[in-house]
Image (cartoon, helix red, strand yellow):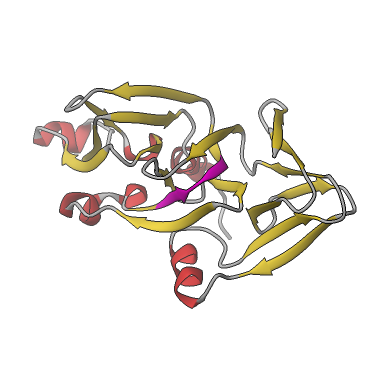
């Protein structure tokens, strides 16, 4: 599979497939394709279906196969931001925010990921239920806004507002901590909890989380 990412704020990824090659995507992500791309819809079993729905994904996925020769298929983002390719290999899993998965080669597995830390589970909000990409192949993830990447050394930490965490390598650990000081909690406007990411490994932060957009426009929504 060869690919090209094009576009600005609403990017697409165009994938060129050899005969018999497959791409897996969430329903509704395909934008255009050549006529010889054959689609098959699958749920992957009851447990996986409900797990994907719980993590924010569709219960079903579409598998596209190039039939009889080379084929082309493209996938589009659903929100202004970036499409980022990720190389998945054995022992090199990635943890992503829910709904970040866009498409992948057939060798990549998508599963629900629960943060096992008590604090993250109780207060983590968006960071509690995430997605794990494992297996072998190229996957594509949607990032809201711009992407900022850091490489954390062993024991090095980054404190992040939870909604700004786009993803991280599975070698990174995640926990939730309280903002210090009662006045800061009540008057600081930054919420009560923050996410702490601890290295080693790469972390991806995004500049336009959907939760922040929703909070910004909520006062302007007129209800009947």
Q: How many marks?
A: 0
- Against 188, is 63 above or below? below
Q: Position of residue 46 (x, y in %)?
A: 49, 77
Residue at 80%, 49% (x, y): give it. 19
Q: Main secondary structure of the magenta part?
A: strand
- Against 24, is 217 above or below? above
- Against 3, is 56 above or below? below
Q: Position of residue 85 (x, y in %)?
A: 57, 34
Q: Is residue 22 left or right of residue 98?
A: right
**Is residue 139 magenta-colored?**
yes
Q: Is residue 58 left or right of residue 23?
A: left
Figure quadrant of the N terminus = top right
**Is residue 62 magenta-colored?**
no
Q: Toward which corner of the image does residue 187 lie, by quadrant?
A: top left
* Nearer-the-camera pick, 24 or 54: 24
Q: Residue furthest bottom?
A: 46
Figure quadrant of the C terminus = bottom right
Q: Residue furthest left?
A: 181
Q: Is residue 92 left or right of residue 104?
A: left
Q: Position of residue 222 (x, y in %)?
A: 57, 51
Residue at 33%, 47% (x, y): give it. 127
Q: Position of residue 118 (x, y in %)?
A: 16, 54
Q: Which span is picked out in magenta?
A: 131-140
């Amino acid at each position: 599979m060869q690919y090209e990412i094009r576009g600005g704020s609403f990017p697409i990824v165009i994938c060129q497939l050899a005969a018999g090659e497959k791409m897996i995507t969430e329903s509704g992500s395909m934008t255009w394709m050549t006529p010889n791309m054959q689609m098959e819809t699958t749920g992957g079993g009851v447990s996986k279906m409900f797990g994907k729905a719980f993590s924010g994904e569709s219960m079903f996925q579409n598998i596209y196969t190039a039939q009889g020769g080379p084929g082309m298929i493209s996938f589009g983002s659903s929100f202004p931001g970036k499409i980022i390719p990720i190389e998945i290999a054995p022992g090199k899993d990635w943890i992503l925010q829910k709904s970040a998965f866009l498409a992948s080669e057939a060798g990549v597995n998508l599963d629900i990921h629960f943060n096992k830390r008590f604090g993250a589970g109780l207060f983590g909000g968006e960071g509690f239920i995430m997605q794990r990409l494992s297996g072998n192949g190229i996957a594509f993830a949607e990032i809201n806004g711009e992407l900022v990447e850091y490489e954390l050394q062993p024991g090095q930490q980054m404190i992040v507002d939870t909604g700004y965490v786009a993803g991280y390598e599975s070698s990174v650990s995640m926990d939730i901590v309280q903002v210090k000081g009662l006045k800061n909690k009540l008057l600081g406007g930054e919420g009560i909890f923050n996410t702490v990411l601890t290295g080693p490994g790469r972390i991806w932060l995004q500049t336009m989380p959907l939760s922040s957009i929703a909070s910004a426009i909520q006062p302007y929504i007129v209800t009947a």
